[in-house]
């Protein structure tokens, strides 16, 4: 049987960083991903990566404070400290690996301004920073010679002797199932964006890891905290980077007014994302938008700057909306973008399950709390990817493989999948169930939320789950059966959706990304705490966890 | 709008075990991309259709395929632009790679070639404490190459790979250039000599025919062929000029720089090397055939008028070439 | 109708039949040509791989000469056409670059403003001359002849430099002309691919494989001959066809015609005047089929 000391599920930035760290710490390491590593969604991070570099007068405390304030004081301050202290070194490491960061006139790393931060500390490669980082990390993965199972989709975990001791994965190209034994497992599976429709997220972002861990008994935390990005393109809902506003772009209503002066007179367009998205939605709801959108205006930045620093989003505007931002404002609206919540871990990536780690968007350390600052997500993946890789390698040194039967594990999964393939045609479609879920979530768990709406979604999710249990899979073949993969993913997404809805219903205040019209104020007395979900006998079980506060006392947020 | 997507299907598990075309008449939004049409078919019409796709915004590189005979990203191509006058779009898998199923191709060889160019930074000497201090222009230039998303569109349409699978191909060579042009990479005074030496071998930079297919196919403006040409310039400068490709370029430039036009009789001789008797004999049959058909270039090569100006330009510009 | 004429090196070198054929048909068509004896080689993309600036400077020099005459520039070679268009594109999108180049041309008393559009005879006939004007001169339509078009890379790619977005008809110009002359177009996949000439002396095996692939594809589809606006393609597809056939272990025997030759034949000019006896692949069977004699 295939076996590895450390098995990393997901080959985005966090996963590859974890793999490289685990290998460097002497572990027999492998990485497994349902897509080739460079197809991962880390690609989509456009604007940059934050770090406070001391040699240019910045310091980690300022970065930490901005992050904590951005999180609406829900982030755990010990974890934020770890991230912000490590940022400088992590950034320089990436530069040494070969990232082609933009430079200033002296040839040093250049910065751009980003939302919710009092100084420019976002380092970048044009407007495709995530892609630049991801490809360089892939280069390092090649260099390290780490075993990589590409286009292998983990469909279930193997649990014996009280711990997770391996996985069963579908080799998509052949349809064959494989069991892989592992001493430790690190989830780096990314977010769950496709639970919402529309979303800026890639089609592969389906919450697989969160759902798998949840089923194995892991605790999910902050699941109500779903970030709506302020600038997603009309129509397709594709992301238009915050880099545009970082470089000075305006948000305009239908009369050409910069409406952010009403909501964030100091930071204007560069207030934190939750604040900007809420302001936009308020304007749109008040009839000051056009076709459900407001405008992002870059014209005054000039053609040269746009071509040099915002070339990708300019292309996206031209390709997908037929609008050239050099010449005209482009229509944008808030759109689901990022999951602050995820698998609860400590600062070393360890979950509540022995030997199980998580890092990146699928994890919740929690460094983002109620709202993530732009350009902190790439940082999160690098810092906690590395930490979880190192710690998992060390832990694996103390563990023995659990001797489970590969044949039995594979057979169980084969039977489950065969049962799905055997379902009779009933006129229903995986895509219809998914669309039902996505639209319900986007209707009731978006920028503004309230009790009856969320209850409606909880109810709808039950009905959708019942449909899912019977939905037929049209493709019965073995080779590259994407139809089957989508069906399996939908199961994961429905579980994730439920945890989001129940967590949001539980939190009876407005904080960060969650704004409840029925509880419009932040209530630190009762709700300055995390909401956690575990899988119970009949459904999600809710508990509360304290927020770690070290030296920054919660205060009212103003931008 | 109404259109028909004609998809080249292939399923190794079912009859016919040969590729075949299937038409899908659909109705879709005016702004839809070709990818949107395929997703619509897969989700609402025929779940057995297999393709790779993910980001929908030309950054993940999954959905490269041939659209109306030429490689591109389905997510970056508007259906309304791709449709012919009868509302038809022809979609088939990327070329030069084995088909796994429908629009999914096997990229194993593609990735092996990327690995072959040792695609990671190899700096000379110890790393600095902080970042490398390098000009922004150099990084901006490299970013034009690192914009490559490894979609394989260039490889799909490469005319050399069509006849010789050993060619490294446009993607791997552009990736190699990303390092040879990086001021941080190098094993001799900032020059990546070992890389350039290996890339000068058979299957490397000199095997490109400059047909431009990769430039046309690349959805990210990487222009792989231009990077291959830049590799050639670097290699010649670094002294790796003992091969037919480099000699060809040198002799060509020399001929034009001296006479203003190309000396077609001398060029092949200088390319293979004046002492390379077997290769020179190899030209004989073709040369004789040309001679008997009155097809040989003039035996006496004449200078163009005002040739002195060309010579001056040659002298000036050959000695003041821009550095990398 | 008058153009500054840029025949390129090969039409007077390796394909000596092309230059007189082109001049002859232009004369019959009433297209006046003014030669530029001081124009240098375009570099064929070869020189550009070592020193782009030198290549672009020579092409700017040629275009400046045409500009000085106040004439449009006619090419008869896909490669010249593409290389000059690419140089033009670079100079037009970077004024500092053009200025730098002009500083080097000053000594010769030349200055290039960027206003010349080099145009291949193929495009000129369709866009400037007009097929309606050509048709009355087609006294011997090529009826029954099955001709496969072969463009040559440089006249089809990259489309941006060649103005193909503004002139989409250029993508099918060769088929249009073949059909206008009364012949049947044999469409085939290889028509816009590479003939292999640029790597002939570098990787002959690959070069021959390309020749073999395209010529046999057209032959197998029933083509009587192939037509190309590129003398470099002609050198390889015609001159090296016997070698390619032996590498491919099959007979091919597909005559390769220059663009002006088919126009000339359709205008009733004798095959000999058009230099058809100078081809490596025997053109006689083709001429017999056409009834034009040997």
Image (spheres, helix red, strand yellow):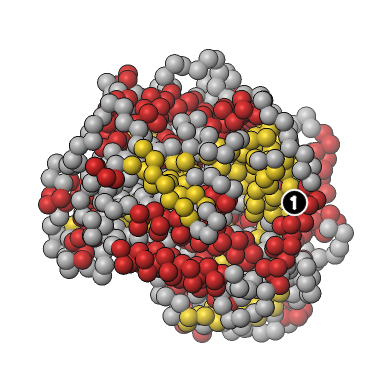
Q: Is residue A547 left or right of residue A462?
A: left
Instruction: Compare residues A135 and B319 and report the one nearer the observer.
Output: A135
Residue, x 54% and y 71% (percent of image)?
A: A466
The residue carrying pointer 1 sits among few (fewer than 14), some (14 to 19) or many (20 or more) residues within 10 Å by Cα, namely many
Residue A399 visible in the shown view: yes
Kind of element beneath mark 1: helix
Looking at the picture, does residue A335 appear above or below residue C56?
below
Q: Residue at x 20, y 60 (%)?
A: A282
Q: Position of residue A2 (x, y in %)?
A: 76, 41
Q: Residue at x 39, y 40 (%)?
A: A545
The image quadrant that residue B306 belongs to is top left
Protein chain holding label 1: A
The N terminus of chain B is located in which quarter?
bottom left
Q: Is residue C1 left or right of residue B200?
A: left
Q: Report the residue marked by disc 1.
A: A409
Give percent across and percent down for residue A559: 18, 42
Residue B54 x %, y %? 52, 57
| Farthest front residue in view | A537
Number of labelled discs?
Answer: 1
- Nearer to me, A262 or C115: A262
Q: Residue at x 58, y 63 (%)?
A: A486
Considering depth in this image, is A47 or A15 the residue closer to the camera? Answer: A15
In-image side of A158 versus B252 (left or right):
right
Q: Is residue A315 visible?
A: no
Quarter of the rendering containing residue B111: top right
Position of A424 relative to B237 (above/below): below
Residue B269 against residue B320 in the figure, above or below: below
- How far across and down, in percent of the image, does residue A449 sit? 29, 60
């Amino acid at each position: 049987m295939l076996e590895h000391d450390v098995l990393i599920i997901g080959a985005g930035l966090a996963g590859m960083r974890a793999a490289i760290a685990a290998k460097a710490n002497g572990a027999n390491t492998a990485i497994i991903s349902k897509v080739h590593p460079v197809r991962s969604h880390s690609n989509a991070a456009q604007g940059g990566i934050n770090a406070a570099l001391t040699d240019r007068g910045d310091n980690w405390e300022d970065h930490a404070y901005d992050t904590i304030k951005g999180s609406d004081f829900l982030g755990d301050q010990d974890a934020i400290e770890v991230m912000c202290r490590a940022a400088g070194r992590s950034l320089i490491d990436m530069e040494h690996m070969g990232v082609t960061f933009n430079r200033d006139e002296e040839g040093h790393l250049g910065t751009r301004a980003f939302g919710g931060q009092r100084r420019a500390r976002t380092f970048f490669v044009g407007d495709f920073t995530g892609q630049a980082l991801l490809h360089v990390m892939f280069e390092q993965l090649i260099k390290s010679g780490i075993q990589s199972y590409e286009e292998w989709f983990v469909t279930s975990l193997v649990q014996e002797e009280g711990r997770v001791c391996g996985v069963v994965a579908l080799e998509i190209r052949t349809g064959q199932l494989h069991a892989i034994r592992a001493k430790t497992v690190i989830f780096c599976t990314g977010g769950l964006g496709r639970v919402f429709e529309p979303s800026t997220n890639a089609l592969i972002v389906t919450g697989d890891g969160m759902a798998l861990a949840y089923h194995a008994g892991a605790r999910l935390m902050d699941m109500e905290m779903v970030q709506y990005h302020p600038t997603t393109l009309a129509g397709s809902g594709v992301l238009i980077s915050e880099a545009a506003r970082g470089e000075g772009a305006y948000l305009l209503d239908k009369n050409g007014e910069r409406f952010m002066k009403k909501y964030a007179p100091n930071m204007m367009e560069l207030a934190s994302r939750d604040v900007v998205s809420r302001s936009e939605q308020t304007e749109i709801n008040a009839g000051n938008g056009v076709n459900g959108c407001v405008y992002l205006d870059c014209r005054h930045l000039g053609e040269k700057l746009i071509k040099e620093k915002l070339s990708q989003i300019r292309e996206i505007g031209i390709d997908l909306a037929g609008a050239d931002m050099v010449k005209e404002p482009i229509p944008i609206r808030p759109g689901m973008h990022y999951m602050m919540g995820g698998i609860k871990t400590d600062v070393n990536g360890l979950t509540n399950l022995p030997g199980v780690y998580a890092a990146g968007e699928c994890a919740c350390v929690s460094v983002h709390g109620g709202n993530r600052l732009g350009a902190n997500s790439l940082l999160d993946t690098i810092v906690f990817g590395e930490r979880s890789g190192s710690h998992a390698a060390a832990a694996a040194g103390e563990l023995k493989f659990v001797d489970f039967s590969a044949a039995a594990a594979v057979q169980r999964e084969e039977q489950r999948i065969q049962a799905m393939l055997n379902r009779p045609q009933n006129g229903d479609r995986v895509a219809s169930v998914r669309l039902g879920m996505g639209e319900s979530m986007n209707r009731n768990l978006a920028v503004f939320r309230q009790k009856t709406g969320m209850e409606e979604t909880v109810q709808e999710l039950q009905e959708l789950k019942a449909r899912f249990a019977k939905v037929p899979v049209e493709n019965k073949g073995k080779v590259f059966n994407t139809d089957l993969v989508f069906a399996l993913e939908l199961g994961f997404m429905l579980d994730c959706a439920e945890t989001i809805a129940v967590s949001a219903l539980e939190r009876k205040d407005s904080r960060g990304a969650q704004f409840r019209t029925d509880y419009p104020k932040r209530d630190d007395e009762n709700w300055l705490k995390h909401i956690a979900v575990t899988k119970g006998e009949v459904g999600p079980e809710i508990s509360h966890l304290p927020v770690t506060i070290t030296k920054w006392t919660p205060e009212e947020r103003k931008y | 709008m109404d259109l028909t997507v004609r998809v080249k299907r292939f399923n190794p598990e079912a009859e016919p075990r040969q590729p075949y075309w299937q038409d899908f008449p659909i109705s879709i939004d005016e702004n839809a991309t070709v990818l949107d049409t395929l997703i619509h078919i897969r989700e609402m019409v025929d779940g057995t259709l297999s393709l790779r796709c993910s980001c929908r915004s030309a950054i993940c590189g999954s959905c490269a395929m041939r659209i109306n005979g030429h490689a591109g990203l389905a997510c970056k191509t508007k259906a309304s632009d791709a449709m012919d006058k009868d509302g038809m779009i022809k979609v088939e898998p990327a070329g030069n790679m084995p088909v796994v199923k429908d629009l999914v191709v096997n990229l194993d060889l593609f990735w092996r070639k990327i690995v072959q160019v040792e695609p990671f930074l190899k700096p000379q000497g110890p790393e600095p404490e902080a970042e490398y201090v390098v000009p922004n222009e150099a990084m901006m230039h490299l970013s034009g190459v690192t914009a490559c998303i490894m979609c394989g569109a260039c490889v799909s349409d490469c005319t050399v790979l069509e006849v010789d699978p050993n060619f490294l191909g446009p993607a791997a060579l552009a990736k190699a250039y990303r390092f040879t042009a990086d001021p941080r990479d190098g094993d001799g005074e900032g020059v990546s000599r070992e890389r350039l030496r290996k890339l000068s071998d058979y299957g490397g930079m000199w095997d490109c025919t400059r047909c431009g297919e990769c430039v046309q196919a690349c959805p990210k403006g990487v222009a792989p062929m231009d990077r291959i040409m830049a590799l050639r310039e670097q290699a010649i400068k670094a002294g790796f000029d003992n091969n037919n490709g480099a000699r060809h370029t040198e002799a060509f430039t020399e001929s034009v720089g001296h006479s203003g036009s190309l000396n077609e009789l001398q060029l092949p001789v200088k390319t293979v090397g004046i002492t390379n008797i077997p290769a020179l004999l190899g030209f004989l049959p073709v040369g004789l055939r040309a001679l008997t058909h009155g097809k040989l270039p003039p035996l006496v090569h004449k200078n163009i008028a005002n040739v002195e100006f060309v010579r001056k330009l040659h002298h000036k510009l050959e000695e003041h070439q821009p550095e990398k | 109708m008058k153009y500054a004429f840029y025949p390129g090196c090969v039409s007077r070198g390796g394909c000596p039949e092309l230059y007189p054929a082109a001049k002859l048909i232009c004369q019959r068509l009433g297209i006046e040509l003014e030669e530029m004896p001081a124009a240098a080689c375009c570099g064929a993309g070869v020189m550009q791989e070592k020193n782009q600036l030198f290549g672009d400077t020579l092409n700017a020099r040629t275009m400046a000469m045409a500009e000085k005459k106040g004439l449009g520039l006619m090419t008869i070679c896909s490669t010249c056409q593409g290389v000059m268009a690419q140089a033009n594109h670079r100079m037009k999108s970077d004024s500092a670059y053009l200025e730098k180049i002009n500083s080097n041309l000053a000594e010769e008393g030349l200055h290039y403003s960027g206003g010349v559009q080099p145009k291949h005879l193929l495009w000129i006939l369709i866009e400037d001359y007009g097929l309606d004007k050509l048709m009355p001169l087609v006294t011997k339509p090529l009826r029954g002849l099955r001709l496969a078009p072969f463009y040559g890379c440089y006249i089809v790619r990259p489309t941006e430099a060649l103005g193909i977005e503004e002139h989409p008809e250029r993508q099918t110009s060769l088929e249009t002309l073949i059909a206008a002359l009364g012949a049947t177009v044999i469409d085939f996949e290889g028509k816009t691919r590479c003939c292999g000439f640029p790597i002939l002396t570098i990787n002959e095996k690959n070069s021959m494989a390309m020749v073999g692939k395209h010529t046999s594809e057209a032959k197998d589809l029933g083509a009587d001959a192939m037509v190309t606006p590129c003398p470099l393609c002609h050198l390889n597809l015609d001159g090296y066809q016997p070698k390619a056939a032996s590498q491919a272990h099959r007979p091919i025997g597909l005559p390769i015609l220059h663009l002006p030759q088919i126009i000339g034949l359709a205008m009733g000019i004798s095959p000999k005047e058009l230099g058809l006896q100078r081809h490596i692949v025997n053109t006689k069977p083709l001429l017999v089929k056409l009834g034009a004699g040997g």
